[in-house]
Image (cartoon, rainbow, N blue to C red):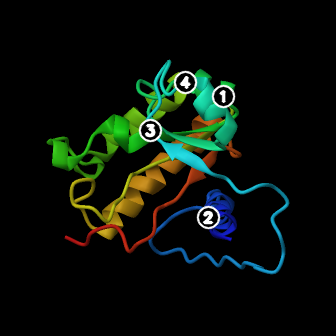
Amino acid sequence: MARKLTGLALALLLLAAPAAAHATDVETVRVDFARPLDRPPLVGFVHGMDTGNPPDERIEPLAPALWRGKLRDVPYTRVQEVGGRYTYVLSDRWGYPGDGKKAPYEDYKAWERFVRKTARASRRGWVVWDIWNEPDEQHFWRGTAEQYYETYRIAENVLRQELGPDVMVSGPEPRGGARTG
């Protein structure tokens, strides 16, 4: 049951992804919990893979549907070889305030250029784009909710411009979330 609920939660996230994210927009999502999913639950992993570890014989029986990371740590081709869908975390590549990096809202033009350059260099079909990791944690995000949503809006627009309207974009992560100060 927990696996089905996890799959359902992720499916909801992916279904809501194409909707434009903006602080003033309100989206409604309806869920029929009585209707079974027409595909298996999406179960995946966070980071933890490189070109040889863990060994394929340990990964393949688990049949991961998603693998989250950044390309230098989690090789795209290896994720694809074990049957997973790659989840690219843009903010991991950009860097975080807790690590001494500037936040996107300090220079939205630089953020836009970064997302565009990353999208152009990463034209792969089976990718879910995750724009910002854990905005409810001060290490990852120190701006306002409005700055978070603007950061997300810019990135989503650029990804759709560069990779097409059907690009899979996750989030934005819930506003239990983005700090307000």
Q: Name the residue that disc number 4 marks.
A: 55
Which mark is drawn over residue 80?
A: 1
Residue 137 at least partly seen: yes
Q: CA distance from mark 1 to mark 4?
A: 15 Å
For the residue pair 145 and 175, the one nearer the viewer reads as 175
Which mark is drawn over residue 47?
A: 3
Specify the amino acid type for callout 3: His
Which mark is drawn over residue 6?
A: 2
Q: Estimate how packed mark 4 is, as few (under 14), some (14 to 19) or many (20 or more) residues with alpha carbons within 10 Å.
A: few
Q: CA distance from mark 3 to mark 1?
A: 14 Å
Q: Estimate how packed mark 2 is, as few (under 14), some (14 to 19) or many (20 or more) residues with alpha carbons within 10 Å.
A: some
Q: CA distance from mark 2 to mark 1?
A: 22 Å
Q: CA distance from mark 4 to mark 2?
A: 26 Å
Q: Is residue 17 above or below residue 88?
A: below
Seen as rendered, the residue at the extreme top is 51
Residue 123 at least partly seen: no
For the C terminus, the image quarter is bottom left
